[in-house]
Amino acid sequence: MTAQWSDLLEQISSQRGAAGKPIYLVIADYIKDAIEEAAIADNTKLPTNRHLSEMLGIDRSTAARAYAELAKDGYIASHVGRGTFTRLPMKTAPAPSFEHTDELIWAEKFSRASQTVYDMFRLEHSKYGWQKGVISFAGGIPTADSYPNQDFEDMLSSILQQGRGHEMFEYSPGEGQPDLRREVKKYLQSQDINVTDDELLIVSGSQQGLDLVSGILIDPQDVVAMEDPSYLWAICSFKSRQARCVPVSLDENGLRLDVLDQVLKRQRVKFIYTIPNYQNPTGITMSVERRENLMQLANHHQVPILEDNFAGELRYEGEPLPSLRALPGGENLVIHMGTFSKALCPALRLGWLVAPAKAMSRITIAKRASNLSTNSISQVLLAEFLNRGLYDKHLSIVRELYKKRRDTMLGALQKELGYLAGSNKEKNKVSWSKPDGGMFAWIKLPDGCHSRDLLTYAERAGVTYAPGDMCFLTPDNPEYLRLCFIQLDEETIKRGVRRLARAIKSYLEDISTVSEENRSYALGAGGQSFI
Amino acid sequence: MTAQWSDLLEQISSQRGAAGKPIYLVIADYIKDAIEEAAIADNTKLPTNRHLSEMLGIDRSTAARAYAELAKDGYIASHVGRGTFTRLPMKTAPAPSFEHTDELIWAEKFSRASQTVYDMFRLEHSKYGWQKGVISFAGGIPTADSYPNQDFEDMLSSILQQGRGHEMFEYSPGEGQPDLRREVKKYLQSQDINVTDDELLIVSGSQQGLDLVSGILIDPQDVVAMEDPSYLWAICSFKSRQARCVPVSLDENGLRLDVLDQVLKRQRVKFIYTIPNYQNPTGITMSVERRENLMQLANHHQVPILEDNFAGELRYEGEPLPSLRALPGGENLVIHMGTFSKALCPALRLGWLVAPAKAMSRITIAKRASNLSTNSISQVLLAEFLNRGLYDKHLSIVRELYKKRRDTMLGALQKELGYLAGSNKEKNKVSWSKPDGGMFAWIKLPDGCHSRDLLTYAERAGVTYAPGDMCFLTPDNPEYLRLCFIQLDEETIKRGVRRLARAIKSYLEDISTVSEENRSYALGAGGQSFI
């Protein structure tokens, strides 16, 4: 504790007199952070007001305000006659509960598809922390601070003022609101993706796109070839229709075509699923040459490709690479999927599908059976947004914002974990990807580590992430974790990486101790190895 | 033709001098109507300007304006030197095209589920007319004239003015936006449906609700017991998951429990699907006693029920009947489904599901995999609408409006087809339902008729409807047609029923001639029957 209070003293003296945070808040935040990071254990007795003010050289009223602030947010509790104690605040956003009642009648009713989705969900949610103050690198939903709210509000007002309000409440045809379709076509054209009216569908978010394409193509036991690791909810969508998902590993240029070629030769593949840009979860971008060769291979085998371009807009370096749809054969073979949820705003629930007319007719009919059509209000709003050229403006803003956040994360990883990245002991070596776009960094722990074991340490330190094993089709890949860098500000990213680095350090120390123990256990009484 | 021009002369003289429609429009509309109803055949040569003005006793300039009006809307075409000819205008809203290209690569890729949905879609769309001017009783989507646009616009403005615009662009959790959840809970409470937070889900339209419930419950070959006939897209949703849909016939009090009991005893039924209020397509309402007995039966067999209350709000007579969910056992056995698309506005794409917590946890996770979450803007807007008590106000308006339209349709049916309803010859007897709510009237043609054959006559007369065979699980039910009465104004309903009656008359005459011919063919040379 002494060391910690001295840290705080430093912070206070550097702050004193400066026109910044009030001292009582500096103190409160410092103690909050310590509680969240478990540097002060739960239920630790804190100094009295008087004692604290003396220790820190502050007024008693400042000490009292600091404690009041902590009490307000639930970080301390006072017991008359006993003193003031720390406590971890109550959970505020629990993961959805899924085991309240267990009436037998329902338990035996669920379909196999439902079981697959349920298992995936548990895999994703089993260990996520929701303690107040925990910094979350898990998930991948951009936060509200990057939405163009003012533009949206201005447009709504102007649509109403123009007497066009009724357009927002009219029923849209299943294929999408006409204005939005026109704007999306133009937007795609700017990426060399030229589509006819028969080839375009507006979807209620790209998850619906995945679901529809899975539905029209997959019969039980059909083979889908896909990157391993890949996007959890794509795996889920395919598996829930009882597809066999065949893994194709990646190298630094993306999907390995030598592996894919073998799969295509040996198996009857229904389609290939790939994320060419800033792949989820690895962050890898498929090179131009690889894209061209992939299309040649697909043409040769006449196998369709589902191209998931979930974050294509979020490129931080170099020129955009061509979509598979824009390459030779793309018009016949590629179903291309994109979304406004990542680069713009997930609340709109809008994305698009591009597919050859023959496939699109089936997808459109499947949408009829899935949710009839997509909400009109957000379609009219987005059409207006695109029509006014605001999306380009917005993209340059978020590209800059997210690029800084990526740089901050990579910098923090280097600063906090660089000593392990350079380690020449394999059992200590930590490495990570340097994505040129998108939202994810992909961390590899030393062999023998498990990202789910580390999670316990991480959450104790006040940070969480997505364990990587859930993204793999193949077993025995426990060493990976995925960090999302777009959803937190730079200061929080730094703080989160600091906490993560501390957790990794403790975890590595513990397993090294354990393995030392194991080793000494394996050694004979005389200390001589039996191995 | 002579008779027709004299009709027009009458209309003109009754209009002349009155402060109403200009004469040229009376003429143009009359001719349009005649073309649409095929009273003037396609490509008929019309009188010259001079001739028309003489025939009708009008100025030449008026005749010219009438023709100009017709030309503008595509009802006539002039050929230099040959004259002016009628033509049916081009299709303006073609059914989605689904057979443009036929690359073999795709044709062999589609799943069985996709084939089921495709077949259903073709069944629904194979013969629908979209000619300009055709009066459509098909479909079941309320039209924009009944949406509370002004209220919606006022609320959007006031949400923006209150600085709450950002709420509309924030991401909503999968289970629904919190304010809307609270309001829907209150709304359900007013119907004696009391739900906990674990039992409620906001869905993107009730079609999504159907799709989710089918997904979590149905494995291939599972049995779903349901009314026969029933809602086409429910049948489709179940069959696309390869359920066996077992038919249970209806009587005037709804689902027949004697039949259901036999099914439950003989087969392992996964769940029962029922539409207790103003059933689609028959318009039948399940009696209170039948509801109570159904719940007893379901309790006895411990079989879940999916209760589809798609139009429960649209009651035109008597007190609302209890939801199955509100009856004993309902909390454990019933999944209850409702929507704001029919009584309010389909463009919002909002509905709800109520289910026991155990089932709801699965449904919520399935929604995650289906489209992640529902659009926030419409949820915030609807929450505000409910919170201000505007839904009750709106319901009393549309109930009155739709009740009038129902009465108009039933009145018109009696006026135009009453002579056949009273027919004592079975081969001429036409009957129809008298729904006490909802949106559909269900017509039965004489035995031996086929509603798809009649469709050809109807479309020639300028009216269309939903042929009933597509709603049946059992074959050999060709005599039914479904008319939606909420989507057209009273005058158009009357005109449409007039056209339908004319079509039925021609059709019955033709098949009676055909059967006479058949009969004389069956008779021997001497006129003596061999039968």
Image (spheres, coloured by chain):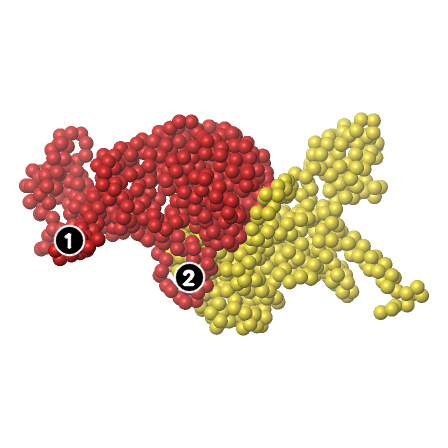
Chain colours: A red, B yellow
Viewer-nearest residue: A219 or B184? A219
- At x 19%, y 34%, the residue is A21
- At x 90%, y 65%, the residue is B524
Give percent across and percent down for residue B315. 55, 58
**Which one is closest to the eye, mark 1 or mark 2?**
1
Give percent across and percent down for residue A19. 18, 29
Q: Residues within 10 Å of mark 2 (few under 14, many from 20)?
A: many
Quadrant that contains the C terminus of chain B:
bottom right
| Chain at tag 2 | B
Estimate the spatial distance between the alpha carbons at disc 1 and disc 2, rounded to whole Å. Answer: 63 Å
- At x 13%, y 38%, the residue is A8
* Mark 1 secondary-structure assignment: loop
Viewer-nearest residue: B389 or A441? A441
Give percent across and percent down for residue B76. 75, 34
Residue B420: image quadrant is bottom right
* Mark 2 secondary-structure assignment: loop
Tally the marks: 2
**Side of B443 relative to B298 (left or right):** right
- At x 45%, y 34%, the residue is A290
Badge 1 and badge 2 both on one subunit: no
Residue A171 visible (yes or no): no
Residue A18 visible (yes or no): yes
Q: Residues within 10 Å of mark 1 (few under 14, many from 20)?
A: few
Disc 1 residue type? Gln
User: Which residue bears the numbered disc 1?
Assistant: A528
| Chain at tag 1 | A
Disc 2 residue type? Pro
User: Which residue bears the numbered disc 2?
Assistant: B356
Note whether B149 is above or below A161 in the view shown: below
Give percent across and percent down for residue A191. 49, 30
Outermost residue, right side: B526
**Side of B494 relative to B159 (left or right):** right
